[in-house]
Amino acid sequence: NMRLMSAPDETKLNGAGLKVDEDHAKFGIKLTRVEDGWVRQVAGEKFWGGLVEVIGFSSYVTVEDCSMTNPISHVASGRRYAFSVDDSEFILIQRCFSSRGRHDFVTGSRTMGPTVFVDNFSQ
C-alpha cells in the first residue's frame, strides 16, 4: 500500500470558505505512453487534478483498489477528476473510491477505448 499527499496552502479560501489553492501537485500518478501497466492500492489526498491520469496513447492499464479524497482546488472545469482517462485504450479502473470530486471517473473526448469502470464508488 502507498499513500500520496499533495501539500496545498490550506489557508487560501474563496468567498464561500472553500479551500482553493492550486499551487501544488495536480495529479498523484500520471501515466503517459504506458503499455501493460498497473496502479494498485494507492491512496491519494488533496491533489487538485486527481489521483490517476492515464493519457498519451497508453494501453492495457489497470487501476485498482485506489482512493482519492479531499481534493483542494476551485470547483471548475479540468479539476477534481479523481480517475481520468484520455487518448488511451484498453483501460480498466476497478474497486476505486473518490470523495468530493467533480467528475470522479471520467474519459476525455479523444479516448479510443475500451475504457471500463467496474465496482467504483464516489460520494
Image: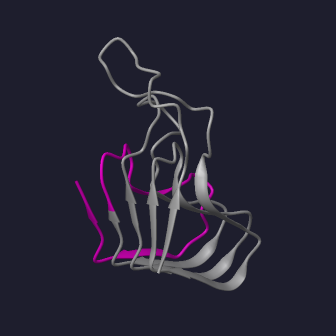
Residue at point 65%, 84% (across, down): 37
Identity of the residue furthest to the left in this view: 123
Colour basis: one colour
Q: Is residue 111 magenta?
A: yes
What is the magenta range? 98-123
Image quadrant in which you'd find residue 16? top left
Q: Is residue 79 left or right of residue 16?
A: right
Q: Is residue 42 left or right of residue 26?
A: left
Residue 70: image x %, image y %? 36, 47
User: In the figure, is residue 44 to the left or right of 97?
Assistant: right
Query: Nearest the camera: 4 or 94?
Result: 4
The image shows residue 34 at horizontal and vertical percentages of: 73, 77
Q: Is residue 10 above or below residue 89?
A: above
Residue placed most toward the observer, 112 or 42: 42
Q: Position of residue 39 (x, y in %)?
A: 55, 79
Left or right? Give the position of 32 relative to 53. right
Q: Residue at x 41, y 72 (%)?
A: 66
Q: Splitting the image into 4 quarters, where does residue 80 fall?
A: top left
Instruction: State how many labels appear.
Output: 0
Return the residue nearer the eye: 115 or 119. 119
- Prevailing secondary structure of the magenta residues: loop
Q: Residue furthest top?
A: 15
Residue 46 sits above or below residue 32 on the image = above
Q: Is residue 43 magenta?
A: no
Q: Position of residue 3 (x, y in %)?
A: 48, 68
